[in-house]
Amino acid sequence: MPLPLSGIRVLDLTNVLAGPYCSMVLADMGAEVIKLENADKGDTSRLFEPQVNGESYCFAVLNRNKKSIALNLKAPDGVAVALKLAAQADIVMENFRPGVIQRMGLGYEAVQALNPGVIYASMSGFGQTGPYGKKGGFDIIAQGMSGIMMMTGEPGGRPVKVGIAMNDIASGVTALSGIMGALIGKLRFGQGQYLETSLLEAGLAWTPWEFGAYFGSGEIPTPTGTRHRRSAPYQAYRSADGYVTVGAGSGKLWLDFCEKVIAQPHWPSRPEYTTQALRTRNADALEREIEAILMQQPTAHWVEKLDRAGVPGGPVFGYEQILQDPHIAARKMVHELHHPLIGPMKTLGLPIKSSGELNTIRTPAPWLGQHSGEVLQQLGYSDAQVQALFAQGVAFDAHPLQARPAGF
C-alpha cells in the first residue's frame, strides 16, 4: 500500500527548523519534497556543527526523505525555475520575513496565478499582519514575548528558555496541522488556500491551562521549577543519587503513593493534604517531606516501587541516557541509515507507529543541490539548457562528481 501522501508534491522554501521540521513529516508520509536552497550556501543549518566530511549532522537529521535543488534566486532564470516548480506543486511552504517572498516574485498571489489550487503556507516570527508583522523573529524572541520564559525555571530566578527550540517546533507542528487540514479540504471540495502561522502564536497556543487560569481568575503564571500548577505531588524530587519524577495528583494515586511507595499511610488524612488543591497550596512543605524520604534510596529503588504500585513515575535522564535506553531501542527511535557523504549515521526515528503504511524513512538528507539537474530535467529543461544554467551559476550542485546512491 502506498504512503498516504504519495504523489503529493511539496516545494519547500523554508530554512533552519520550523519549516524543515514540517516538511520532513510530510516527506516521511510519502510526499515528494523538493527543498529549494540558495546556491552556494543553502539552508543556514548546513553550517551548524558538528560537521562530518563537510556535512552538518544536525541538518542531516532534519532533512531526510527530501530532494535538494540549489538556485540563484537573484537571477531571473532562477526565479523562473522556482515558479515552474511552484506551478506543479500541491503545497508550497516558506518562512521568510513577511514581504520578502513577494519581492522575490514567489508570493502566494504570483503562485496562485499559475496554480489556482495550490496550498500555500507561510511561517514567520509574528504573523503576516499586526503591529509586529514586519518584525524579524527567532525562537528565543518568541519564547520571551509569549510569556513562556517568565513561567519557566525555578521560583525567583531569571527567565529561562525551554531546553529545546519549543516555539520553532510548535510553529512547524501548527503549520503541519493546517496544511493537512487544507489538503483534506482540497481533496473534498477542490479548492486550495493560503494559510499562515507564527512562532509567537504557535507557542502561545500551547498554554491552555495558563490561559484559562488568567482569564478565569487573573492568575499570572510564574516559574514553578518542575511542579505542576494544579496538581501535587507532581514534580521531580531528589533521591539519593539523582532525581525521580512522581505524578500522583489524583486522589487514588495519592493514596497509593503514600501507602505503597513511601509507607506514610497517615498522610492522606492530614488537614493540609486532604485535597489536591490543598496539596498544591502546600507544595513547599510536601516537597520537603517527600524528599526527606526519597533521599534515603537511589532513583532506581523508587522507580521500581512506583511501577509496582501503579503510580506514574520515572528517572530524570540526561539526553545521553535516554538515547541509550532499551525502551527507546525497542521503540526504534534511533534509526540508522547511510548518508553518501557522512557515511553511516543515526537519525531520529518515527514517533508515530501505525498498523498500515503511514510513514517511512527512505533516504538520507541530500547534499546541497544534489537533485538540481534531476529536477530541472523533470521540469522539461533539455540537457543543454541544464548545463547552461549550471554554467551561468543559476543552478548549483555542491558535489557534481559524487555518485548518486540508488533511490536518489
Image (cartoon, rainbow, N blue to C red):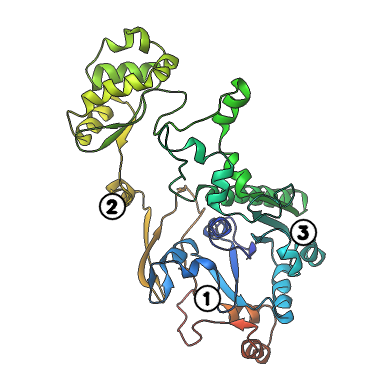
Q: Is residue 300 above or below residue 265?
A: below
Say which of 93 and 146 sits in front: 146
**89 to the left or right of 160:** right
Q: Residue at x 47, y 45 (%)?
A: 161
Amino acid residing under circle 2: Gln
Q: Secondary structure at mark 1?
A: loop
**40 to the left or right of 318:** right
Amino acid residing under circle 1: Leu
Image position, residue 231 (x, y; %): 43, 23
Q: Which residue is mark 1?
A: 368
Q: Which residue is mark 2?
A: 324
Q: Which residue is mark 3?
A: 117
**225 to the left or right of 18:** left
Mark 1 vs 3: CB contact within 8 A: no
For marks 2 and 3 on the same chain, the one whose residue lies earlier in the sequence: 3
Badge 1 density bin: few <14, some 14–19, many ≥20, Cα 10 Å: many
Badge 2 density bin: few <14, some 14–19, many ≥20, Cα 10 Å: few
Q: How far is disc 1 from disc 3 in space, using C-alphas?
A: 29 Å
Mark 2 vs 3: CB contact within 8 A: no
Q: How far is disc 2 from disc 3 in space, using C-alphas?
A: 46 Å
